[in-house]
Image (cartoon, rainbow, N blue to C red):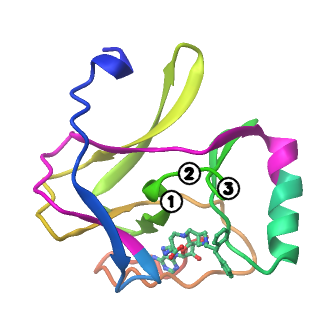
Amino acid sequence: MKFNQLKVRKKQLRFAKSPIHDWGLFAMEKVDANDMVIEYIGEVIRQKVADHREKRYERMGIGSSYLFRVDDDTVIDATKMGNIARFINHCCTPNCNAKIITVDGQKKIVIYAKRDIEEGEEITYDYKFPIEADKIPCLCGSRGCRGTLN
Ligand SMILES: Nc1ncnc2c1ncn2[C@@H]1O[C@H](CN(CC[C@H](N)C(=O)O)CC2CN(CCC(c3ccccc3)c3ccccc3)C2)[C@@H](O)[C@H]1O
């Protein structure tokens, strides 16, 4: 089914302080399992450009960036141009999935509900960060928490 034929009734969402980390994204209405929640909007850039930007963001002290890896040569950067999807936090037992779909040759990241989500629940997905040496402790607080983001 083409992306624009999807039932793209925008979900009522809001960003607010999160018990997981800083700001998060919350459902303002019930979301049914498998419904599309939001697209992760940002600039589509090549891996090389993302590497340079990541170093620049580190130098600027903005640390963790709004970079979302799509595949081994495509990254979506929501730092300068993005939507509220960039506020979605990680959870080891998330209520959403991030799926990559291709629409007219353009790769898009769409966040779908894995299960029914109640009004007021925080929207989360598994970041699936690559394993790294310097660990980022995970604050998701869920029973199945793996302890680190990477
Ligand atoms: N389960 C978890 N456990 C522990 N930590 C978690 C978990 N889930 C998410 N996180 C944290 O959230 C990050 C992902 N984050 C998700 C949303 C985040 N909650 C938020 O409130 O922004 C988006 C990134 C946070 N950054 C914002 C930078 C900001 C900035 C930073 C410093 C100084 C000034 C400005 C900035 C602002 C504008 C432009 C550029 C940078 C992007 C992860 O990388 C991790 O650090």
Q: Which residue is drawn at 52% across and 33% down?
A: 108
User: Which residue bears the numbered disc 2?
Assistant: 82
CA separation in Å, label 1 and label 2:
7 Å
Is residue 4 located in the magenta-colored stretch of the structure?
no
115 to the left or right of 62: left
Which image quarter is the N terminus in? top left
Looking at the picture, which amino acid does disc 3 mark? Lys
In this view, the mark in front (1 or 2):
2
State whether residue 81 is above or below residue 103.
below
Tell me the quarter of the picture where residue 36 sits: top left
- Determine whether label 2 and label 3 are within 8 Å by CB: yes
Name the disc covering residue 86, or none. 1
Furthest toward the front, the residue is: 81
The local secondary structure at tag 1 comes to helix
Specify whether residue 72 is in view.
no
Q: Which residue is drawn at 87% across and 65% down?
A: 55
The local secondary structure at tag 3 comes to loop
The local secondary structure at tag 2 comes to loop
Q: Say whether mark 3 is within 8 Å of ligand 1.
A: yes
Residue 38, x across and y down, in percent: 36, 45
Looking at the picture, which amino acid does disc 1 mark? Arg
First of labels 3, 1 by sequence position:
3
Residue 48, x across and y down, in percent: 87, 44
Residue 39, x across and y down, in percent: 42, 42
- Determine whether label 1 and label 2 are within 8 Å by CB: yes
In this view, the mark in front (3 or 1):
3
State whether residue 150 is above or below residue 2.
below
User: Which residue bears the numbered disc 3?
Assistant: 80
- Find the magenta span and give its range: 24-50
Specify whether residue 13 is in view.
yes
Q: Residue at x 15, y 58 (%)?
A: 117
Q: Say whether mark 1 is within 8 Å of ligand 1.
A: yes
